[in-house]
Image (cartoon, helix red, strand yellow):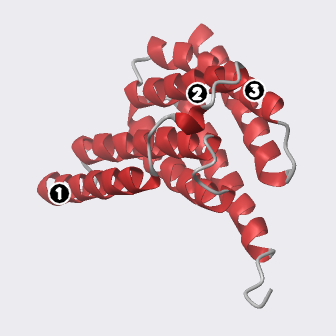
Amino acid sequence: MIAAILGWIGSILYLINHGYISSVKQWNPNIYYGGNLIAALSLVISSLMIFSSQAVVINGFWAFISILLIVKFEVAKIPFSKRVFYLGLIFILAWAAYIGFEYSVTSINFYTVLGWSSSYVFCLSYFLFCSKKLNDIKYLLFNAYAATALLPILWSQGNWPVFSLEVCWAVISVYGLYSRIEKVHLID
């Protein structure tokens, strides 16, 4: 019962926060990172209680980055580039494709690798975005992918608060992406 309550609190707070950053152009970093920290810690505890590994890793990483940003640590100085992120993503997606062909795309093995690809994308796109190495459009695109890629493993684990969070997260990300792309003019 405690795991579910903490999970729902963290999920709702994350959704409010993600809606905030997706719809407000000039968002306040202290509100965003503070909200992410509280949501992440709630979901780490909740996911630990039900042994949902990918959710623990994602939210633990988000909590860590949020703490660094709240204490004004300059995460942009950490030497990690988009190139390394993209190469890692290609590797993980190739691994997922191999597992999908080897075991079937409906196997728990495939769902697990897909879930780890989501963990990778969620964590490192958040880091790159917070260090201003990834723009908001790419960040929202990666978030839409990561949220949907995590769904099969969360379903199989019965992690309903995080499953619901990811469905809503994907929708909010696509909405934010659409609203920003709609404002881009090729002629301007």
Q: Which of the labelled discs sits on residue 65, or is there none?
A: 2
Instruction: Give the position of the N terminus as an image quadrant.
Output: top right
Seen as rendered, the residue at the extreme bottom is 187
Q: Earlier in the sequence, mark 1 or mark 3?
A: 3
* Above or below, 100 relative to 79: below
Please state the horizontal and vertical placement of residue 87, each as a whole percent of the image.
32, 56
Q: Nearer the viewer, mark 2 or mark 1?
A: 2
Q: Nearer the viewer, residue 130 or 16?
A: 130
Q: Nearer the viewer, mark 1 or mark 3?
A: 3
What amino acid is found at the position of numbered circle 2 in the picture? Ile
For the residues labelled 3 and 2, say whether their Cβ atoms are less than 8 Å apart.
Answer: no
What amino acid is found at the position of numbered circle 3 in the picture? Gly
* Above or below, 87 relative to 186: above
Label 2: few (<14), some (14–19) or many (≥20) C-alpha neighbours in 10 Å: many
Q: Earlier in the sequence, mark 2 or mark 1?
A: 2
Please state the horizontal and vertical placement of residue 146, each as a whole percent of the image.
49, 49
For the residues labelled 1 and 3, say whether their Cβ atoms are less than 8 Å apart.
Answer: no
Please state the horizontal and vertical placement of residue 2, each as a whole percent of the image.
61, 8
Q: Which of the labelled discs sits on residue 98, or is there none?
A: 1
Q: Earlier in the sequence, mark 3 or mark 2?
A: 3
